[in-house]
Amino acid sequence: MAQATNTIALITGASRVIGFEAARQFGQQGITVVLTGRNQEQGTAAIQTLMAEDLTIDFLELDVAQAASVTAAAHNIEQTYGKLDILLNNAAAYADWSETASSADLAHAQDVLNINLFGTWRVIQAFLPLLKNSQHGRIVNVSSGAGSHGEKPFGLTTGPTATSYAVSKAALNALTVKFANELKEQRILVNAVDPGLTATAPGMEQMGARPVAEGAASVVWAATLPDDGPTGGFFRDGVPLPW
Ligand SMILES: NC(=O)c1ccc[n+]([C@@H]2O[C@H](COP(=O)([O-])OP(=O)(O)OC[C@H]3O[C@@H](n4cnc5c(N)ncnc54)[C@H](OP(=O)(O)O)[C@@H]3O)[C@@H](O)[C@H]2O)c1
C-alpha cells in the first residue's frame, strides 16, 4: 500500500461505477480513501482493485439507511483518523422510470427518500464532528438534474424521471443549501453536484451517456475545491446549474 496522506475522504455507496471511480480519482491525487458500501464482499473486491493500482484505500461497511451502521462507521473513522476532510454522499436508490406522482407506491417512495435524502442527512450529522476537526472540510452531495427546475431534458418540469427520485434530489439540493449556510462560519464547503447522464448501466451509452470517469470528475471537482471555493451551489463540471 502507498504511503497515506493527511487528507481523508469517505465515499458512500462506492463499490461500483461513479462512487468507485471517484475513489480512484481521489487516490490518484494522493488522498487516503475510505470506500464504503452496504455489501462487505463487493466492497472488499472494489478496494482490492484499487490497491492493485497502488492507491491508499480502505473499506468500511456503511448502510446509509441504517442509523446504527452510520454511527458505527463514524466511530470507526474517529478512532482511526480522528477527523474527516471530504465526505462524498454518493449512495442513491432509484425508482422505475414509469413511476408517476399519482401512481407511485408510497412505501417504495419512502425508501428512495430514506436513502437519497435522509440517508445523506443522517451521514452528514454523524460525520459533522469529524469534518469540524478538519482544516478544509468539504461535503459533496451527489444530486441530479432530475431534481432541477431548469434542467432539460431530465428535469422536474420536462423529464420523464421517476417522481420519488426527482423529489429526493430536489430536496437534497435544498438540504445542501441549509447545511452550507449553517457551516459557513466553520469554513466547511457544502455543494450539490450532478455527474450528468453517465453510462453506469448497459445501454446508457446509446442514450448519450458519458463515460463514468467524466461523471466522477464532475463530483471530485467539488470535493477538492480551494478554501475560497463556492458553497451552497449546484454544479455540473464546475458550472452552476439552475435548481
Ligand atoms: N448514472 C447517472 O447517469 C446519474 C445521473 C445523475 C445523478 N446520478 C447520481 O450519481 C450517484 C451514483 O450513481 P450511479 O449511477 O453510480 O448509481 P448506482 O450504480 O446505482 O450506485 C449507487 C450506489 O449506491 C449504493 N447504495 C444504495 N443504497 C444504499 C444504502 N442504503 N447504503 C449505502 N449504499 C447504498 C449502491 O450499493 P449496492 O451495490 O449495495 O446497491 C451503489 O453502490 C447517485 O447519487 C445518483 O443519483 C447518476
Image (tube, helix red, strand yellow):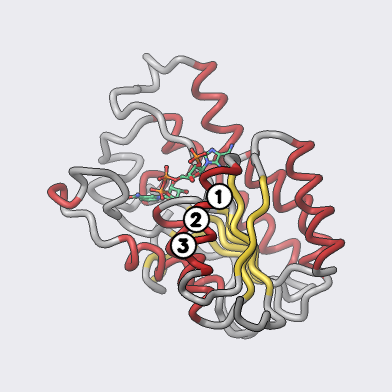
Q: Residue at x 39, y 22 (%)?
A: 101
Farthest left residue in view: 206
Q: Residue at x 70, y 63 (%)?
A: 181
Give the Cα separation between the discs numbered 2 and 1: 5 Å
Mark 3, secondary structure of its residue: helix
Q: Residue at x 26, y 34 (%)?
A: 160
Amino acid type at image mark 3: Thr
Which residue is label 1 attached to?
43
Q: Nearer the viewer, residue 23 or 46?
A: 46
Quarter of the figure that contains the N terminus? bottom right
Q: Is mark 2 within 8 Å of ligand 1?
A: no
Mark with earlier residue (1, 3): 1
Which residue is label 2 attached to?
46
Q: Is residue 88 above or below residue 121?
A: below
Amino acid type at image mark 1: Gly
Q: Position of residue 98 (x, y in %)?
A: 28, 23
Q: Residue at x 75, y 61 (%)?
A: 182
Q: Position of residue 143 (x, y in %)?
A: 47, 52
Residue 49's mark?
Answer: 3
- Image quadrant in which you'd find residue 80: bottom right
Mark 2, secondary structure of its residue: helix
Dots 2, 1 in contact, CB < 8 A? yes
